[in-house]
Image (tube, grey):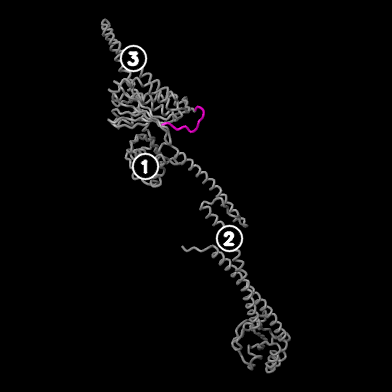
Amino acid sequence: MLRQRLIWQLFPAFLLIALTALVAAALFITQAVRSHLLTQFEQDLAARALLLAPQFDDHLASGDYTEVNALCGLLDAATEAHIMVYRMDGSIAGDSRSDEGGASTQALPPEVLTAKNGTDMAFSERENRREGQTMLYTAYPIMRDGAMLGVVRVGQSLAPISRAVQAMYFWLLIGGTLVAAGVAVVSWRVSHRIIHPIEQMKQGAIRFASGKLDMPVALPEAQEMAELAEAMNTMARQLDDRIRTAVEQRNEQEAILSSMVEGVVAVNRQQHIFSMNRAATRLFEVDPERVQGKSIHFAIRNSRLIEIIGETLKSGGPVSAEIQLHKEREVLLQAHAAGLKNAAGEPIGVVVVLNDVTDLRRLERIRSDFVANVSHELKTPITSIKGFVETMLDGSVDNPEDTRRFLGIVAKQADRLHTIIEDLLTLSRIEREEEVGESYLSEGAVRPVLEGAVQICGAAADSKDIRVAISCADTLRARINAPLLEQGLINLIDNAIKYSDAGGEVQVSAEERNDDVRIRVSDRGCGIPGEHLPRLFERFYRVDKARSRAAGGTGLGLAIVKHIAHTHGGRITVESRPGEGSTFTMHLPKPKSAGPELRIING
């Protein structure tokens, strides 16, 4: 549909109304003026007829029609009126503009008949073909001594009235043209005054639609327009408040979803994704912008997740299940799905919350293994002690040699049990200090700590003829807790001695790198297969259980070393190859500046 601007609808309408009124007024005025002139003309014509009637009574009474006709000519020249005299028989006694005096006529004009019948004076307007102009006629009876002798008929041309009306038309046309021009200008101005506020409100509506709600519409002078503009401004303020509230709520929601460690995926009833937080995109390794609005079947190709969403859409109730993701490492997710409903309570989709329980399951497994290992480690010496005690109670006590041998075994197992308990207590103490922040670090020299640890392990090294070499600058300093660090190094050096061949060598070195201080303990022993390295620092984890127990190990030494490194704000790493030996490295933070004692809280 073709649309026109409002001004081209209002302006022609105003102009047409004004011109129609102008034409109607012109027609009314001309008709009124013509009617007024005609009335005056009739009055003048009637007065002439009254004055002329007495001029013909003597001649009609004497029958001198020639004189009547001559008198009509004279009076016509004096009055410029067409004068005719009719006898009672209807014949023409005289005609000022014809020489046919005494002629008869078959049909008398209506004004003559009216005068002959003695009724009121009548007027008649008709075309005179002989003269080629419109004439106005009237008639009046000629009376003498109460008797009607004839009728005088007076006619006069209406040309003066026509000329006056035509002149009026001319001036009305000129005046109407000027008035029409003025009306056009006024109509244009009025239309523009109506359209301009509407244009302003249109521009304001466009600004509001584009989001510029802080630019109100100017108030026009017209009350109705001003009320409409004020209503638009009020609407804009309310929309701005609502949009700001909605944006704040959306930003808060996005901030909450983005900050959640749990993954959140929301889909509609067609299983198209309409919301997905950062945690979920990291878990499924997808681009959030590319999956927005896409079907979950194509965006996230995980059959178990799709099954959970389908079950939730079907049942409407919450569904919980575990999902496995096969990435660089296996990830286990706990999925909780629930139906989404709108304000009217109608289902609109499903939201799934995903918790990464990989570490939790690993810790549960480690805890289970720890309990089993503790039970097993404690059970072995206790069972051995109980067995030999029962043997002695059964009679072996009477044999001094067996009793001494059995008591030696019991003492050895009791020492083993004591060592396990001591290591557990040490590990527990270090963990407690690490958790509550009771470990204190101060800047000190590293070499004395290395020398103290080597000295304590000297007896074990001498028993296997193993040389322990130290490589450390006297000036090397670090933020350390000397007793704890020494205990960790003792565990590392002791392990290196245990798993090195007789006559070998153990290297203990320390150096400062760009980002940390590194203390290494290296041996040339049997080495550790690569599959054992990730779990090497777990409690009671053993690479070779039989050899470890034979060497007197409890399986807790490396776990203690790991926690000691964490207490210092560092970490422990290992490099090893079977048959080539192992290197354990403690990475400690470099001292930033000399200062007082530093308390480490929560590792």
Number of disc labels: 3
Say if 513 sits above or below 212 in the image: above
Query: Which of the pair 57/288 is nearer the observer?
Result: 288
Q: Nearer the viewer, mark 2 or mark 3?
A: 3
Q: Is residue 588 magenta?
A: yes
Q: Quadrant of the C terminus?
A: top left
Verify CB contact (< 8 Å) between mark 1 and mark 2.
no
Give residue 332's mark. Answer: none
- Image check: 290 left or right of 58? left
* Coordinates of residue 124 in the picture (x, y in percent): 63, 81
* Coordinates of residue 272 in the picture (x, y in percent): 38, 45
Query: Which of the pair 395/60 is nearer the observer?
Result: 395
- Callout 1: few (<14), some (14-19), or many (20+) C-alpha neighbours within 10 Å? few
Q: Nearer the viewer, mark 3 or mark 1?
A: 3
Choose the circle earlier in sequence order: 2 or 3. 2
Give residue 285's mark. Answer: 1
User: How many angstroms separate mark 2 from mark 3 (CA)?
Assistant: 104 Å
First to last magenta residue range: 587-597
